[in-house]
Image (cartoon, coloured by chain):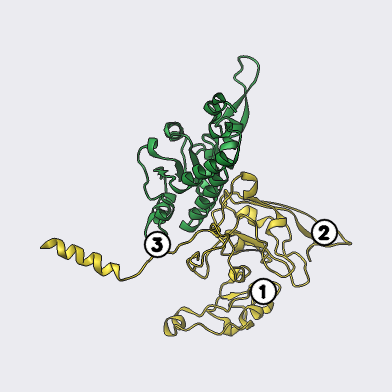
Amino acid sequence: MGYLEGFAVTFKKWGEGVTTREYRAGRKNRKGEISDKDTKRPKPERAHGRHVLNKYEDGMEKCIGCELCAGVCPANCIYVRGAENPVDDPKSPGERFGYVYEINYLRCIHCDLCVEACPTEAITESKLFEFSFTNRQDAIYTKDELLVGDDGKPQQMPWEDWRPGEDEMTSGWMRATAPSGKAEYLGVTGWSGELGYGVRAGDLPQDEKDAVSVTISTSDDHGHDGHDDGGHH
Amino acid sequence: MGFADVSDKGLAGLEHNVLTGQLEKLVNWSRARSSWPATFGLACCAIEMMATGGSHYDLARYGMEVFRASPRQADVMIVAGRVSQKMAPVLRQIYDQMMEPKWVISMGVCASSGGMFNNYAIVQGVDQIVPVDVYAPGCPPGPETLLHAINTLHHSIETGELLSRRNANGGGAGITVEQRDGQGEPKLITLGAR
């Protein structure tokens, strides 16, 4: 009667419901609708995805064309060329700005080293990871495609699968503990936001995180205070 | 429309009327829904490819759960991982052994462009050897990225874009280089073409 024990597993699993997440990449069915079951698996808070180039609140670009991101990139996927800022129409607050900015997504390994290297928080990574290309030209994102819009939200290419609310985690630059900053930020990871959009609450220190499992309040103070004077540069 | 057109060009040789238009739709529909992949896992991307076949993402939803070990039974080759120079002729032979119509997904940055392995050992892009239809970026691409690539491929199969493109470039990768062997006039070589 050993096989009955085997069947017992089958019947037990039968009642447990479906584990499959029917992700269909936003493809429409015959009626032209997107299925309700077409959902993504929730990503970790610090997942690395497609990059965005951020702007300041006044619309200035944050990139100053220093090429540090291109220098640190292990896959050599970033190509930057800086140029002198035009005096009458400056693109960035610095002396120079990113004249050409290209990322080849057929080389990028999403290691986030460019984000860490950037001195002005110009380049950050969103969590968008669901995209594919049918030709190589689409895979090279130029500055026009990487720059956020005037509302601080990333542009959405037709071959990318954005879902509502996903762009809220785009801006944000992880700031490690800054001993020179405010004392209350000791051991706290802060996230800074651009244009006031997509600001996250800071992470708790590990011992507090272990103590409380509830999410902390999502007010802007962590991000913005950290942005103004809590930084390490 | 004659029999010669159909025997030479296949469905594309048909002059379309209502009946054959529906027939082509039906053929493309069935091709998109039973495109069996050939096993070509080469590196860490293959782990994600296996995860895509697992129960959470479930490639069987697309009729793709059978990864065939024999290229004769496969329709889609998912090149998952870095292709070394020694593996390149093997990959091309597997591709040649697959039955028409056949498609290629280049999964991951290593297969697509060499990725961070920009050195003498790795082929800088598998599209130098075989014609690639869809590129999936990422290192490695997650199962959802691969599913996005698969859905993009299925969409292209259903609309019939890909077959017409293959006819245009003769089954090659669409890359043409000037071959100089010092023996005579430089001649144009189309990579990946038969």
**Chain B's colour?**
green
Are the residues flagged by discs 3 and 2 from a single subunit?
no
Report which residue position mark 3 lands on.
B56
Q: Residues within 10 Å of mark 3 (few under 14, many from 20)?
A: some
Pointer 2 chain: A
Report which residue position mark 1 lands on.
A197
Q: Position of residue B92 (x, y in %)?
A: 46, 33
Q: B118 or B28: which is nearer to us?
A: B28
Q: Identify the residue shown where x is 24% and y is 67%.
A: A11
- Tell me the quadrant of the picture where the N terminus of chain A can be found: bottom left
Q: Residues within 10 Å of mark 1 (few under 14, many from 20)?
A: some
Badge nearest the viewer, 2 or 1: 1
Q: Identify the residue shown where x is 55% and y is 76%.
A: A189
Image disc number at residue A85: 2
Image disc number at residue A134: none
Real-space Cα distance between discs 3 and 1?
A: 33 Å
For label 2, the SS is loop
Real-space Cα distance between discs 2 and 1?
A: 26 Å
Look at label 1 and name its amino acid: Tyr
For label 1, the SS is loop
Q: Position of residue A151 (x, y in %)?
A: 72, 70
**Chain A's colour?**
yellow
For label 3, the SS is loop
Q: Identify the residue shown where x is 46% and y is 44%.
A: B78
Pointer 1 chain: A
Residue B118 visible here: no
Look at label 3 and name its amino acid: His
